[in-house]
Image (tube, rainbow, N blue to C red):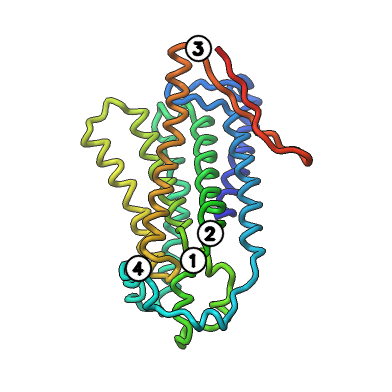
Amino acid sequence: MFRIVFFLFCFLTSTLSLAQKADSLKWYKSHSKIYYAPPITTGSIAAAGLLANYLGIRMLNNRPSLDINEIRKLDINSVNSFDRHVFDHAVEDREDSHNFTDWGLYVSVVLPFTLFFDDEIRKDWIEVSLMYLETQMIAVNIYNYLGPGIFRRYRPIVYMHGHPDVPDAELTDNNNERSFFSGHTSNTACGTFFTAKVLTDYHPEWSTGAKIGVYVAAFIPPALVGYYRTRAYKHFYTDVITGCAVGALTGVFVPQIHKKLRSKRAADGSGTAFMPIMQPQMMGLYVRKTF
């Protein structure tokens, strides 16, 4: 996931530098009629999120390997009855399922960029792009610091110790205590629900039924990715349900905050600007309120 986010960040910063030369005012102001997302502020928050994500991943990767003797003491029957059905899947098929979820994640993460086929959204492509990167950064850092950063839950594969198709070297990987919650499902849901939210915000004239249909369609990719994450023995059912909820809520709420900020500025001309401060001796957030 870090590689995907890094690619998105590099892509956006390179294209934004070209856009700045073409229209410098667009870099400093928010022109969207739907969202208030000044590029400098939104981009800075996204950049701070990228740094936090790097540090979070490094923190998780630096954990020690798992103790094989402790793993051999694990019992499938200690898993709750709902999650225990994960073990009904054939462990030999886990690699194909894992590959499917990777592709599902990749497609879903870039899905919001198809929004720019819409003429109205394409006019605000800089703000929407940066807002999306900001949204994904929030989602990945919720995962890093409030998921496995706090909860150390063994992945289902660890319970398959002794299976001829599961070598001990695979079991002791420290990645195997990051079951809660599913990052793949969260980032997939973040991408699809962000797409649904922006699309419906730009088209308030659509019927309620059409909007519901958009959100139902947004649920399908994370549901599939989540299901196949369980078949890949990467997560339990509660892990992917939680991941889907976290990603969907993030994908909807972050654009909604920017929408509320636009409505507030339109109503009274006031606004709040945020700018992360990152220095060797200090990290913080600069806040400026205008009336």
Q: Residues within 10 Å of mark 4 (few under 14, many from 20)?
A: some
In front of the other: label 3 or label 4?
A: 4
- Quadrant (top left, top right, bottom left, bottom right) of the C terminus: top right
Residue 148, numbered label: 2
Q: CA distance from mark 3 to mark 4?
A: 51 Å
Q: Earlier in the sequence, mark 2 or mark 4?
A: 4
Q: Earlier in the sequence, mark 2 or mark 3?
A: 2
Q: Contact (CB < 8 A) between labels 2 and 3?
A: no
Label 1: state its secondary structure. loop
Q: Position of residue 140 (x, y in %)?
A: 53, 49
Amino acid under disc 4:
Asp
Q: Looking at the picture, which amino acid does disc 2 mark?
A: Pro
Looking at marks 4 and 1 on the same chain, the residue that comes earlier in the sequence is marked by: 4
Helix, strand, or loop for circle 3?
A: loop
**Residue 91 pos. (x, y %):** 40, 78
Q: Which residue is mark 4?
A: 83
Q: CA distance from mark 1 to mark 3?
A: 48 Å
Between the residue at mark 2 and the residue at mark 1, the CA separation in whole angstroms equals: 8 Å
Q: Position of residue 114 (x, y in %)?
A: 42, 40
Q: Earlier in the sequence, mark 2 or mark 1?
A: 2
Taking the spot 32% from the left edge, 28% from the top edge, the residue there is 203
Looking at the rendered image, the disc whose residue lies closer to the viewer, 2 or 3, is: 2
Residue 19 image point, x, y percent: 60, 29
At horizontal 32% and vertical 52% (from top left) the residue drawn is: 220
Task: Check whether the beta carbons of the residues at disc 2 and disc 1 lie within 8 A of each other.
Answer: yes
**Amino acid at circle 1:** Arg
* Sequence order check, earlier mark of 3 and 4: 4
Q: Residues within 10 Å of mark 1 (few under 14, many from 20)?
A: some
